[in-house]
Image (cartoon, grey):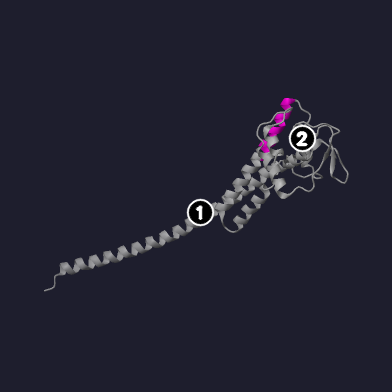
């Protein structure tokens, strides 16, 4: 004799299982679609973040360059960040862009601190100068086949080194200091009429050492020879 109750229950169970499987498959598909959409959105956000970081670094470095305070490798780091962006490595692009941003900010900070110290001391010349005063000065004259430079009022090692006719980089001023140690007693105090030799044969390691000293020189004051300057000259 057929047990209709059991048959009915079996059919109900089978139908339930079928509905459950259909529902499970539907949720699985929706989950995959949502996951893909989320991944796409995340990638878009990362790319946008990298692009913004690079734009910020470029803007800050442009300000540092305007002050003649740009660090030599900042532009190269920005280019590396752009290369990482093009390759889809957004994390690396952001890291490099942030590094360039910090360098540009530090460059401007150092330049402003040097200028502030000179203004406080009342010195006419020294190793730092403001953007406005540096841009308004005509500077001295090159001599002897561009291997010598005559100092004029308002000059300092910082802005002399920044001139295109010298090194086009203010952070290379220690090269001038070292080449003229016999007549520069204080790197922060030079005088109109002095004629400095310009070292045109400095090696790459000499240039790196000069830039490193300019960036890590530490506290200084006009009228005295800093211990860090003496250590640099002794290298």
Residue numbers of the magenta segment: 107-121
Residue 206 in the image, given as x and y percentages of width and height: 72, 46
Q: Nearer the viewer, mark 2 or mark 1?
A: 2
Observer-nearest of 215 and 16: 215
Whether 224 is among the magenta residues is: no
Q: Quadrant of residue 16?
A: bottom left
Number of other residues with Cα within 10 Å of mark 1, as a class: few under 14, some 14 to 19, many 20 or more: few
Mark 1 or mark 2, which is nearer the start of the sequence?
1
- Quickly name the residue at label 1: 42
**83 to 70, vertically: above or below:** below
Q: Residue at x 30, y 63 (%)?
A: 20
Q: Residue reaching furthest left?
A: 1
The mark tally for this picture is: 2
**143 to 18, vertically: above or below:** above
Observer-nearest of 148 and 35: 148
Residue 171 in the image, given as x and y percentages of width and height: 72, 41
Residue 159 in the image, given as x and y percentages of width and height: 77, 38
Q: Quadrant of residue 217?
A: top right
**10 to 199, vertically: above or below:** below
Q: Which dot marks residue 132? A: 2
Observer-nearest of 25 and 91: 91
Q: Is residue 84 toward the left or the right of residue 206 in the image?
A: left
In this rendering, does residue 70 appear at all? no
**227 to 21, vertically: above or below:** above
């Amino acid at each position: 004799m057929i047990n209709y109750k059991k048959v009915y229950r079996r059919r109900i169970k089978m139908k339930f299982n079928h509905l459950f499987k259909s529902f499970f498959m539907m949720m699985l598909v929706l989950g995959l679609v949502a996951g893909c959409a989320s991944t796409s959105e995340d990638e878009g956000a990362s790319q946008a973040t990298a692009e913004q970081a690079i734009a910020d670094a470029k803007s800050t470095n442009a300000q540092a360059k305007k002050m003649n305070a740009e660090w030599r490798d900042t532009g190269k780091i920005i280019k590396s960040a752009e290369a990482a962006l093009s390759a889809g490595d957004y994390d690396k692009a952001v890291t490099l862009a942030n590094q360039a941003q910090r360098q540009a900010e530090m460059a401007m900070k150092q330049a402003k601190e040097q200028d502030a110290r000179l203004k406080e001391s009342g010195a006419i010349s020294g190793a730092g100068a403001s953007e406005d005063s540096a841009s308004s000065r005509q500077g001295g004259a090159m001599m002897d086949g561009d291997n010598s430079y005559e100092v004029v009022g308002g000059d300092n090692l910082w802005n002399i080194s920044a001139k295109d006719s010298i090194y086009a980089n203010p952070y290379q001023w220690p090269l001038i200091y070292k080449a003229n140690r016999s007549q520069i007693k204080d790197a922060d105090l030079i005088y109109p009429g002095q004629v400095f030799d310009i070292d045109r044969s400095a090696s790459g390691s000499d240039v790196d050492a000069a830039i490193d000293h300019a960036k890590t020189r530490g506290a200084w004051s006009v009228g005295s020879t800093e211990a860090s300057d003496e250590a640099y000259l002794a290298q």
